[in-house]
Amino acid sequence: MNTVGILLTGGRSVRFGSPKAFAVNEQGHYFYEQSYQALAAVCDSVVIVTSKELFPRFPASLHVITDLSAFQGMGPLAGIYSGMLELQADRYVVLPCDMPFINKDVLSYIVEAAVDTMICAVQIKEQKHPLVSCWHRAMLVPLYGALVQNQYSVLKLIDTVKATWLDGEMFVDNACHIFRNINRPDQMKVVE
């Protein structure tokens, strides 16, 4: 099966104070670089979906797009839809740039578990992480339907299709750390 990675980097980063995609970790790498490497290790190709403002900051060597004009600024669903239209594949591994501790092993597990389901995503206790997920190409139609109806909730869309929720604690040590979103600079320190 052909697999494309969709890296979502267009968020407004209001609580963070600057674009999270270009936040620098303790090793001196941008957040987007860490997420990109994890996706590239398990996907045939990767497309970065970002905002018009951030587009020029990415290297020309990477495949970078913005949301389709009809859905500019409409959140993660617009980014996923735009990425799916940009590169045709059987399935898409979705990852936001603000979860920099996710690695290729985590994504490999999700891809392997994404059998006979429209979406395979991760849950830690009661916390669902719908943007750490694998989407079947058939999701194009429900994605488009949600966007044209101004329904932007990823979780609401997932509730309408056959989805598999993986318990992150069953396949990752220190899952609460690995699957956390970095929303403020003080959360960047690695927790062992």
Image (cartoon, rainbow, N blue to C red):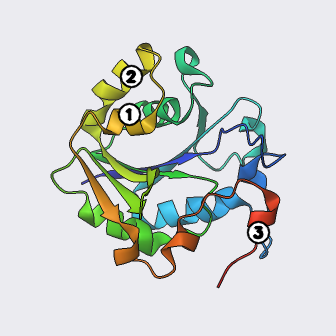
Q: Residue at x 81, y 64 (%)?
A: 186
Query: In the rendering, at what x and y percent does residue 130 appear?
Result: 43, 48
Foreground residue, 19 or 66? 19
Residue 156: mark: 1
Earlier residue among tags 1 and 3: 3
State yes or no: discs 1 and 2 in contact (Cβ < 8 Å). yes
Quarter of the N terminus within the rendering: bottom left
Residue found at x 27% / y 45%: 90
Q: Which mark is residue 146?
A: 2
Give left or right: position of 125 versus 166.
right
- Of badges 3 and 2, the one in the foreground is 2
| Residue 178, quarter of the rendered image | bottom right
From the image, state whether disc 1 or disc 2 is nearer to you: 1
Q: In the displayed image of the protein, which residue is found farthest to the left?
A: 116
The numbered mark, 1 or 2, whose residue comes first in the sequence reads 2
Residue 53: x %, y % from top left: 77, 32
Q: CA distance from mark 1 to mark 2?
A: 9 Å
- Residue 67 in sight: yes
Marks 3/2 in contact by CB < 8 Å: the verdict is no
Please identify, in this view, whether the residue under mark 1 or under mark 3 is nearer the observer. Answer: 1
Q: Quadrant of residue 100?
A: bottom right
The amino acid at mark 3 is Asn
What element does badge 2 sit on?
helix
Task: Residue at the far front: name it.
Answer: 126
For residue 48, the mark is none
In screen coordinates, is 138 left or right of 64?
A: left
Instruction: Quadrant for the C terminus, please.
Output: bottom right
Residue bearing the label numbered 3: 25
Relative to 172, say whether 80 is above or below: above
Q: Amino acid at mark 2?
A: Ala
